[in-house]
Amino acid sequence: MSIDSLISRAMRGFREELRLYVVAVTSLAVAFLCLGAALLALQNLGAVAERWGKSGHITVYLRDGLEPAEITRLAAVLEGLREVDHVRVVSSEEARAEFLARTELGEEVAELGAEVFPASIEVGIVSGVTVEAIEKLAARIGALEGVSDVESYRGWFEQLASLLSAGKVGATVIAVLVGFCVFAVVGNTVRLSIARRRREIEVMKLCGATHGFVRGPFIVEGIVQGLLASALAVAALAAAFFALRAELNSAFSIFVGTEAVFLGPGLLALLVFSGAFIGATSSTLSLRRYLEI
Amino acid sequence: MSIDSLISRAMRGFREELRLYVVAVTSLAVAFLCLGAALLALQNLGAVAERWGKSGHITVYLRDGLEPAEITRLAAVLEGLREVDHVRVVSSEEARAEFLARTELGEEVAELGAEVFPASIEVGIVSGVTVEAIEKLAARIGALEGVSDVESYRGWFEQLASLLSAGKVGATVIAVLVGFCVFAVVGNTVRLSIARRRREIEVMKLCGATHGFVRGPFIVEGIVQGLLASALAVAALAAAFFALRAELNSAFSIFVGTEAVFLGPGLLALLVFSGAFIGATSSTLSLRRYLEI
Amino acid sequence: MVSNRESRGGRPFAFFRAGARVGAEGAERPILAFEDVYKFFGKDQPALRGLNLTIERGEFVFLTGPSGAGKSTLLKLVYRELTVDSGRILFCGRDIARLTDRSIPFLRRNLGIVFQDFKVVPHWTVFENVAIALEILELPARLVRSRVGEALERVGLSGRGDERVGTLSGGEQQRVAVARAIVSEPALLLADEPTGNLDPTLAVDVLTLFEEIHQTGTTVLFATHDHGLIERRDHRILSLEQGRVYDVRRGLASWSSSGVHAVREARRAAG
Amino acid sequence: MVSNRESRGGRPFAFFRAGARVGAEGAERPILAFEDVYKFFGKDQPALRGLNLTIERGEFVFLTGPSGAGKSTLLKLVYRELTVDSGRILFCGRDIARLTDRSIPFLRRNLGIVFQDFKVVPHWTVFENVAIALEILELPARLVRSRVGEALERVGLSGRGDERVGTLSGGEQQRVAVARAIVSEPALLLADEPTGNLDPTLAVDVLTLFEEIHQTGTTVLFATHDHGLIERRDHRILSLEQGRVYDVRRGLASWSSSGVHAVREARRAAG
Ligand SMILES: Nc1ncnc2c1ncn2[C@@H]1O[C@H](COP(=O)(O)OP(=O)(O)OP(=O)(O)O)[C@@H](O)[C@H]1O
Ligand SMILES: Nc1ncnc2c1ncn2[C@@H]1O[C@H](COP(=O)(O)OP(=O)(O)OP(=O)(O)O)[C@@H](O)[C@H]1O
Ligand SMILES: [Mg+2]
Ligand SMILES: [Mg+2]
């Protein structure tokens, strides 16, 4: 069949059912937007989980009244440990300054002396160390001379990890549901445009058109719909993401330790082409029983 | 118009378009499921936020080597403060026991003496105290004799609060999108069944049927669809929730401090009836232009 | 049908609003009057141009004319599928163009219409297709059943009420359309080419059926191309051409008693 | 049309597969043969019962009979909208029932069909409705335009190609259906009541058109109720009744030269 006639017949379909296609593409775009958002969430959660899995971190609170020399020695000892990547000494003064910077309160708090804030050593752990190994390390460090307390963040980590995996499950469920919705919507739209154009299909069949000839324009329409909808969704998602990026980062970054990232070009292309693919498939399936005229 | 004839004509519609309605109700149920899940998340986030807003909590780490009498005195002082609701003393021994209970590690850790774990006093704050007031209180407590460190959880709180509000925004966006989808799907389904039954509508109009007579069965069909879909979604949501409840609680409860709750009967009824309402509205709107035959 | 006519006391007349009756003034006036009616489709192609026409209550009028003359357009104006572009159409003295949208159904309830393209619902049964005309009038189910049965018998489709109309032959579908038009005993019967798919015998039967209904007081406006049919009856014949009334005469003038028609006619006269 | 026939070298014959030619054996056989054909709709109501019938290449056959006799069913069996329940239908010697689904389009490309219910697409223009028959054959757009124009002229609709078919009158729609059937110059023309909505003048014009096409070698099977039409021509007339061939005769036997037909006939003979 000639491409010219195929395209011109598909264009005729679009012209005639413009309203229908606008509604369909919009609702499809919404569905794809949900899918994209779920994927985005999944991807970022994955990134966070990976980062957390890799980068452990321990805070070692020091006993009051340690000499700077003792602190330096302790830091050196810690740095010498196999699991330790780097250390950073936070003196009482610095802890006080950080605290004051974080509160907006004035006088009363500012009067607090540095002695209120214990000095500490922030210990970065090399990547790849398991939570259990970090826990053991923390216990060993806790037994060292001059250490008052060790915070290994294990509890938080475990809770956040379970939160993350719950989030992943949720996002996956949403992706599946949305995929189903997209399929149903495309199918219904195609079925609707077929129902309206039943007579047309019947006439073509009775005049000796092959299935391919009849199916062609509908499949083109399905593909265009899917493409348009997914491209629209990607555009909207990108717009929303980059508009809200600063906000997202400030809300999440301290907490999760990573910057929010957008979907990679591969995933984006996959999303758009899956739109086209679903459109084509759904058209083909919906057409099947109508071709048996 | 007689109810009998209305019902029997609506039933005829269902019989004739059974496949269509199954698809429509399924995809609507999916959409409602998303809506319900978003509402559920919103409701639980709200509960968490409320609880957090109310119940502040400070951990006061004590200097090593304090006498039990000194600790008791300090606890009494803290309990006397206006903002404090209750206090609980956690001795070094208890802290060690708690820590050991939390880790699954054996020997090495078990060898740690109680002196590694600082004693602390958990201070519950009366509800209604603002974050800033708690911060001030923590500073005052930190200045007390015998206190080595005060943890007011302000940083965590702020990060979690922003996480919560981001979650709320997300859930609301999802609810709006899903509402739109439901509307589009019902509209398309009704439009599809109208397109197939155009001849029927035309005939009735030409035989002198009023708009109400023609519209009746379609609206009944829309309502039944919406009701079925939302009821199905509520059932699925409840099944999923109660099946996963234990898991959810263990994942979230320590972290957020509340148990996950299901949607209240009012919200559930609202969800189901909004299904019926959207079905009816969408039918009516979709029918409008077809009635002008 | 008879039982129903008795129960309602004469010709039912729910005009413009269900339950309202046409007053004395309505009864005196012609049932249908076209006053200088124009209907344009596009600037330069009027389908009707200055039509003047009066149809008296109880008349039987044939409408004929070549393809595209405007016959269907004329009928569509009466049942308000179309509205006039200028001029007036009076039904019982009331201007159809000035009906509100809400009143149109009540106008149509006074009409029985056989459409040129049948307009039957293919996925409904024969019974349902005919019954809809009565269901709209909210008649009780029992009465609907008996009257539909009677109408189907009159068009020669008794016993076929349960078949889906989509599976019927062209002529059978046309007869379903006829049954639907007559089942509600309308004041005015508009038939647009109601015999185009019927063999000559059935065509005469349907014409005879319309004449029987005409005997009970119904006004009939019968558009047809079938000269064999119109010339053999003593009714007014309106010939349209290019949207104008081109000729008005009465039938039987040029009727030649040859062929199958004569045989049937003789049989009919005898029985 | 002439240019196309030349370019393709005689009657095109893409049968079963595009590009295939019917061999010598096919050309000798009757174009259509019914051998003891039964078609049942439901257990007890056969629409065709034991039909035997042969139509030679280049014949012009009228098919008539009362409503519900099985005329449309017979035609539907030929274009495989329906399949026989027993017996065989041979088209050029090949059994239609044994065609695969993929071959059916290539069978239909040899046929031109005027459907009883027109089957035009109301939201397409007149041009598009006729052109689709050629677009399916993948003819170049230029050729499609010229041949569609010619076909429309032959049915009296030239210059109306841009109107939407849904807005045409019944008779005009029927002529669009006729144009679509003839535009592809089929080997076999099946016409089911193609003049039911036409006035007598146009009906004769369409019949004459079919006869002209018949002159070029096309076989025509023409189902109609219009006795005025069939009796005046010297073609074979098959009368069906209750699914059986009830009578076979030739026309002109009982033709009475009265009424409008005579006038037209005279004019036609003169011109
Ligand atoms: N909705 C419309 N839009 C445009 N043109 C129209 C419309 N309806 C009718 N026409 C045109 O008006 C003219 C008269 O149409 P009408 O249907 O009244 O003819 P008719 O007398 O019923 O013919 P037939 O005997 O073929 O049914 C035709 O030429 C037709 O094309
Ligand atoms: N698909 C079907 N299912 C059931 N019955 C059918 C079907 N098609 C046709 N029939 C029945 O078969 C019989 C013959 O139908 P057909 O359409 O062949 O008649 P016809 O000779 O064309 O009549 P007409 O002149 O009225 O068009 C009719 O009684 C019809 O009801
Ligand atoms: Mg007409
Ligand atoms: Mg037929």
Image (cartoon, coloured by chain):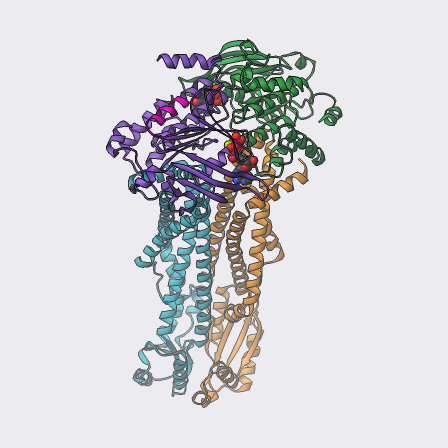
Chain colours: A orange, B cyan, C purple, D green
In this view, the residue in front, B254 or D182, is: D182
Residue B62 seen in the figure: no
**Residue C232: horizontal and vertical position, in percent?**
45, 19
In the rendered image, which quarter is residue D111 located in? top right
The range drawn in magenta is C207-218
In the rendered image, which quarter is residue D267 located in? top right
In the image, is residue A115 above or below residue D45?
A: below
Query: Can you say which quadrant of the picture contains the N terminus of chain C?
Result: top left
Q: How many marks?
A: 0
| Residue at screen point 62% across, 17% down | D266
**Residue A45: horizontal and vertical position, in percent?**
51, 61
Query: Can you say which quadrant of the picture contains the C terminus of chain C?
Result: top left
In this view, the residue in front, B101 or C46, is: C46
| Residue at screen point 31% across, 28% down | C147
Residue C235 seen in the figure: yes
| Residue at screen point 60% across, 23% down | D205
In this view, the residue in front, C42 or B202, is: C42
| Residue at screen point 45% across, 38% down | C34
Furthest residue toward left: C7
Q: Main secondary structure of the magenta part?
A: helix
In the image, is residue D89 above or below residue A23?
A: above
Magenta-drawn stretch contains B64: no
C232 displayed left or right of D10: left
**Residue D184: horizontal and vertical position, in percent?**
65, 27
**Residue D137: horizontal and vertical position, in percent?**
66, 30
Magenta-drawn stretch contains C216: yes
In this view, the residue in front, D48 or D5, is: D5
